[in-house]
Amino acid sequence: MDKRPIGIFDSGIGGTSIWGEIQELLPYEDCIYLADSKNAPYGEKSEERILELSIKNTEYLLAKGCKLIVVACNTATTNAIDYLREHYKVHFIGIEPAIKPAAINSKSKIVGVLATKGTLSSSLFHSTSKNHAAGITVLEQRGTGLVEMIENGNLQSDELYTLLERYISPMLDKGMDYLVLGCTHYPYLIPILKKMLPENVTIIDSGQAVARQTKSVLEKFNLLNNSNVQGAHQFLINKNEKVLVNILPTEKLKLSVCFKDF
Ligand code: DGL
C-alpha cells in the first residue's frame, strides 16, 4: 500500500490524454500532472535542452513526493528516459510511438507515423522502428505546428484541418493503412482525423498501453494505493491554465488546476 501520488509530465497539455487512461485504469491513485506549456514545443528543441527540461520536471515531481513518474511525452521519452532511469531511483514509465502493433496488423505493410521532429530524429525511435517493423515501410511525418495549435486551445479550426491534411494526404497516397500517433498531443486530433481518413485506416496511440504498464509496475513493486476512495488529481501548469481547464473533465473528478512558475 503506497498512498503517494503518481507523477506525470509533458511539454504541455497533451499528456493529459495519457493521464485520462491512467485515471480510468487506476481510479484510486492520486496524480500530480506537470504541464510545461511555457517550454512547448519540446519537439523543436535540441536533445540537450529536452534532457534539461526532463530533469527539471522530474526533480519537481520528486520534490512533491511522487512514487513513480510517467513521462507522458514521446519527445522526452525518446530523448531523455535512459538518462533519467540511470540517474534517479524512482521507476519511470515512458511512451513511444506504437509501431509494433501497427506493423503486426498492417495489411498494406505501409505504416504512417506522425510525431515531432525530436521523436523522429532520436536514436531510440530508430532502434524501435528497426526492431519492430522489419518488412514494413514506415512513413515518417513531422507534425510541425500541431502542438502549438493544440496548446493554444485550437482543436477544431479550418487552419488546423488544412495543416493536418497536408501531413496525412501524402501518406494516404502511398497506401498507409495504419496511422501511429507518436505525440501525446495528437489524440486530441482524433475527431478531425476521423473525418479525414478512409475507413480502412486504423489510428493507433499508446495511451492504454502506458496505463497498463503503469499498473503492472505499481503491482510488481508493491506501490499500489489500495484504498477504495477516488483519487485526487492536481494539475500544475506554467502558462494558459484556461486551455487546460477546457479539456479536463472538471465536474466528474476530484481535480484542481493551478498556475505555477516552474
Ligand atoms: N506531447 C509531446 C510528445 O508526445 C509533444 C512534444 C512537443 O512539445 O513538441 O511528443
Image (spheres, rainbow, N blue to C red):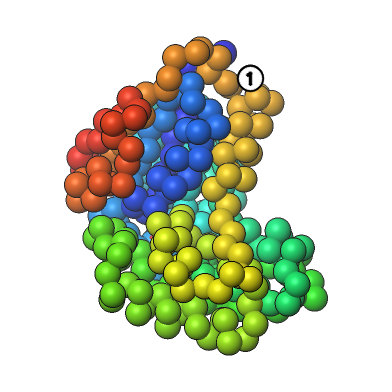
Residue drawn at x 41%, y 75% as measured from the top left? 164
Answer yes or no: is residue 83 visible: no
Category of crowding for the residue at label 1, using alpha-carbon neighbours closer than 10 angstroms: few (below 14), some (14–19), many (at least 20): few
Q: Which kind of residue does numbered mark 1 sit on?
A: Asn
Vertical placement of residue 200 versus 24, above or below = below
Location of residue 22 in the rendering, given as x and y in whole percent from the top left corner: 51, 36
Residue that mark 1 sits on: 222
Location of residue 90 in the rendering, given as x and y in whole percent from the top left corner: 55, 32
Residue drawn at x 62%, y 86% as measured from the top left? 174
Q: Nearer the viewer, residue 37 or 86?
A: 37
Answer yes or no: is residue 172 visible: yes
- Quadrant where the C terminus sits is top left
Vertical placement of residue 147 versus 20, above or below = below
Residue drawn at x 33%, y 38% as measured from the top left? 249
Location of residue 246 in the rendering, given as x and y in whole percent from the top left corner: 25, 46
In which quadrant of the rendered view does residue 104 lie? bottom right
